[in-house]
Image (cartoon, rainbow, N blue to C red):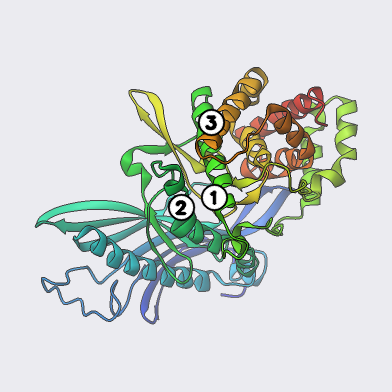
């Protein structure tokens, strides 16, 4: 399998990889693809992989013999289709880890997560789970997740009545970026800490309802089993259309509440609290596609949409755009930011066609920082620039009103003025530029001709014009 192939006839491979049986339908085919750096001829490796759990089934150490005590099915089916461009070793290698290694490793994590989920769920809710089925990945192209997200469907008995439920499996992916590099940033440990410790503490401090999914189980490999919010009719925003005005308002109310709770939480921490190792410093910059190349690609795409003067200004801001934002002095406002507060990670619940509630997911990038960072990222990635131009003051004042009300009720002794916020936004202009030119470009998967790129370029040009008029750049 190490040599390159260019045939399109699928072949079926069956392998016994203890304790699993693996069924693979795979084929290679040539494909012309428009990449971030122009047209490129690629060898595409396409696989459909089905993994059946082996001895012990879902419950290690328990013989699944169909007895009344244990009736969980002993076969776990996991199907996933993978497309990869051939870059070395004929598509057999990606970032130093073969596709088979990745999927077998992830299947072990998945099996461990399901085991732990069954144990915890039965103990917590006094039920007996009778079967589990794992669906395909639920993450859509462009969702930019650093973990594999799948849905777990399960059946259980409660007081002799048969019922069904759903949960979300979130498994750190060996393929998202170099796994060891991701692990060193504490991203996966941080999210576990949030679900297990920090979020429950925030709910207690604020005497408020949970604003994140429940945690059902976590494994040593940091795989999570979480509440499936879609069961309660929560749906995410649309990445392309972004948020409407009502969604923007309720999202900022939620963000302000979270920031106030985070501020209070930081006040309660002792200097030697273990939380500081996870939230007390800005995480290292991840190394993905070279950022200089992303910025140069941005300039090429945006040039026809900018005035010559603004284009020249942007060329001169390259170093500042690519630099990590400098942290403000200690006396500046400091909260626990979300770090990735955008449409994909904000879920809305509607009642009578009106948005009434919101919940937040994906806590891997959360840390101690200035609230302006979350606001900048949210506005750029999630609020249409047309809405920003006509409602920016209204939305920022709404955020500040909620934040200050909550800071007061929590007896923090702190408030945050509009002047402070405006100064912080200007101070972090490098983060504003990086979000527009690089982060948002990657979220929108800009580069391939089509709706995503057109919408991104049009909006980015208007954002830069807006920042110039506001004298931020």
In the rendered image, which residue does mark 3 sit on? 405
Residue identifier under label 1: 265
Give the quadrant of residue 296.
Answer: top right
Q: Residues within 10 Å of mark 3 (few under 14, many from 20)?
A: some
Do the residues bearing badges 1 and 3 touch, measured as CB atoms within 8 Å? no
Instruction: State the residue at coordinates (58%, 71%).
Output: 92
**Residue 14 in view, yes or no:** yes
Vertical placement of 362 versus 11: above or below?
A: above
Write down the quadrant of residue 224 in the picture. Answer: bottom left
In the figure, is residue 203 to the left or right of 317?
Answer: left
Among the two numbered marks 2 and 1 on one chain, the one whose residue lies closer to the N terminus: 2
Q: Position of residue 177 (x, y in %)?
A: 62, 61
Report the residue marked by disc 2: 201
Q: Residue at x 32, y 69 (%)?
A: 115
Instruction: Say left or right for 367 vs 113.
Output: right
The Cα atoms of the two marked residues, 2 and 1, are separated by 8 Å
Between residue 305 and residue 319, name the one nearer to us: 319
């Amino acid at each position: 399998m190490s040599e390159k192939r260019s045939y399109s006839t699928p072949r079926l491979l069956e392998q016994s990889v203890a304790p699993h049986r693996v069924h693979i339908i795979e084929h290679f085919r040539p494909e012309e693809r428009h990449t971030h750096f122009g047209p490129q001829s690629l060898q595409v490796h396409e696989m459909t992989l089905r993994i059946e759990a082996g001895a012990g089934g879902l419950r290690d150490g328990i013989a699944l013999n169909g007895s009344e005590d244990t009736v969980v099915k002993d076969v776990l089916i996991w199907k996933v289709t993978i497309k990869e461009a051939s870059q070395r070793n004929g598509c057999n290698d990606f970032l130093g880890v073969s596709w088979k290694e990745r999927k077998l490793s992830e299947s072990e994590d998945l099996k461990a997560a399901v085991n732990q989920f069954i144990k915890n769920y039965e103990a917590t809710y006094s039920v007996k789970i009778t079967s589990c089925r794992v669906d395909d990945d639920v993450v859509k192209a462009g969702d930019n997740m650093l973990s594999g997200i799948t849905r777990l469907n399960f059946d259980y008995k409660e007081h002799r009545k048969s019922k069904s439920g759903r949960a979300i499996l979130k498994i750190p992916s060996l393929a998202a970026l170099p796994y060891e590099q991701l692990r060193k940033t504490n991203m996966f440990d941080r999210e576990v800490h949030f679900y297990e410790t920090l979020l429950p503490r925030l709910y207690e401090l604020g005497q408020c309802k949970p604003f994140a999914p429940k945690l059902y189980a976590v494994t040593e490999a940091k795989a999570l089993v979480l509440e499936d919010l879609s069961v309660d009719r929560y749906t995410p925003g649309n990445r392309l259309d972004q948020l409407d005005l009502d969604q923007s308002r309720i999202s900022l109310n939620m963000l302000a509440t979270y920031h106030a709770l985070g501020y209070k939480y930081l006040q309660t921490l002792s200097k030697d609290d273990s939380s500081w190792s996870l939230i007390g410093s800005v995480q290292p910059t991840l190394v993905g596609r070279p950022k200089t190349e992303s910025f140069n690609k941005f300039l090429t795409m945006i040039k026809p949409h900018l005035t010559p003067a603004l284009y020249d200004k942007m060329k001169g801001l390259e170093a500042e755009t690519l630099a990590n934002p400098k942290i403000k002095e200690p006396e500046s406002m400091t909260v626990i930011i979300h770090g990735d507060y955008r449409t994909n990670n904000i879920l809305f619940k509607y009642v009578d066609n009106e948005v009434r509630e919101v919940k937040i997911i994906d806590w891997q990038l959360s840390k101690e920082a200035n609230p302006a960072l979350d606001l900048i990222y949210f506005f750029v990635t999630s609020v249409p620039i047309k809405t920003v131009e006509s409602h920016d003051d209204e939305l920022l004042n709404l955020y500040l009103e909620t934040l200050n009300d909550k800071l007061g009720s929590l007896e923090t002794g702190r408030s945050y003025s509009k002047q402070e916020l405006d100064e912080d936004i200007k101070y972090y202009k490098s983060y504003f530029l990086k979000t527009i030119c690089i982060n948002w470009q990657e979220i929108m998967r800009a580069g391939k001709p089509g709706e995503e790129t057109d919408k991104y370029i049009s909006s980015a040009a208007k954002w830069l014009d807006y920042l110039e008029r506001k004298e931020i750049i």
